Image (cartoon, coloured by chain):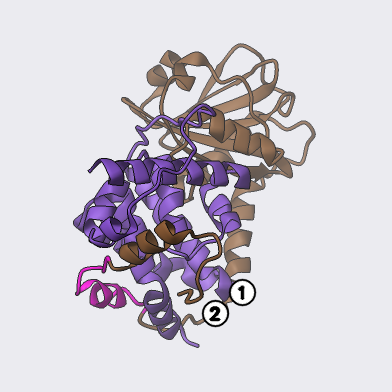
Chain colours: A brown, B purple
Amino acid sequence: MMTEPNPDFDPTDAVIARKLRDVLPPADLRRQLLALAPEAPSRWPAWLMSIGAGAVIALVLIGSSLLSPPDSSAAVRDLARFLDSSFELTVVGRPLPELKAWLAAKGHPTGAIPPALAAKVPEGCRLLEWNGIQASLICFETPSGVVHLVTFPAGTFRDLSSTPRFAQSGLWSAVMWRSADADFLRFGDSGAESQRLLL
Amino acid sequence: MDREAAFREAVDAHYQALFRYALSLSQNEPDASDLVQQTYAIYARKGHQLRDPLRVKAWLFTTLRREFFATRRRSARFSDDPDEVAALPAVDIQRLDGIDGETLMAALGRLPVEYREPLTLFYLEEHSYQAIATLLEIPIGTVMSRLSRAKARLRKLLNDD
């Protein structure tokens, strides 16, 4: 905790800050938190765990196809596997324009999202890389279930056109299409019919 | 240092500030306690992957924030209106000194969340402008303008009460 007077504080700020620091957590919170402590030290060094986790994600995301441009079916299969994992979103709780701005600032693709889906509230987004190709993931929660939209640069897949194609991979219904500015792969867990409604 | 010791150190160093931040977001003590517990539960599982111990604080605040917004839709509309009041109203310091922390926290709770968040982080003296900008994923200029407007709004609330 800082003990020197904060140069950014005026006298009113200083009183408010002091009052806020007077707010104390419940008496038993620390005990409850310490009960969450990991019981045993890791059997593996932290750096090795990190490399291992990174390698697993890379293996999941790197498709078997090395052809260029690839077929979207390999991406659908790999991404469905990725979506089954306990992945995390990097930015959450932001409106769609802010998510797209964040992705664009990171140099990842953002295309014109179909209005039916763009009207839904997004959960969040993250960066993806598949076969060395940068992609973007935006997740939405819709009344009929979760929808994950993966955006690739236009022309990434040789088999996509403006006519949507449908596929099933595990529990995920996928729809893929190409727009003027992006190749889209969209995954939903509530069947192909729900996917059609969002086109 | 083993994982249990590192975890204990992370709790003792940050849980009070995290609780105040959580309280400013959730506006009630049970939810704030739950948020802090969720955050440390995730840290217990994943904290060992953090290579730089100096990033623990930023990681904890970011994770708590993510957990909060993952379970609560942001309903407040952003209102970075350049015409909004930015001048700081004067507040009677002696009168302010008579207000307790809970009352102040309640006044903070009446601010839109986009103002409440940076102001809480600022007053907790735990975060620089740059750290707030990084945590909230907004430009530092936006942090400064929101802080200015947030302070003006809070002081107006305190004067009106």
**Residue B125 position (above or below residue A38):** above
**Residue B91 position (above or below residue A171):** below
Q: Residue furthest right?
A: A68
**Residue A96 position (above or below residue B108):** above
Left or right side of B45 for B103? left
Give me the chain letter of mark 1: A
Mark 2 near mark 1, Cβ–Cβ under 8 Å? yes
Task: Provide the residue designation for mark 2.
Answer: A44
Q: Could you tell me if residue A75 is visible in this image? A: no
Q: CA distance from mark 2 to mark 1?
A: 6 Å
User: Does the magenta stretch mainly form a helix, a strand or a loop?
Assistant: loop
Q: Secondary structure at mark 2?
A: loop
Task: Provide the residue designation for mark 1.
Answer: A48
Give me the chain letter of mark 2: A
Look at 19% across and 74% down and name the residue there.
A27
Image location of residue A72, percent across then percent down: 64, 30
The magenta span reads A23-38
Dot 1 alpha-carbon crowd within 10 angstroms: few under 14, some 14 to 19, many 20 or more:
few
Q: Could you tell me if residue B102 is visible in this image? A: yes
Left or right side of A169 for A159? right
Q: Secondary structure at mark 1?
A: helix
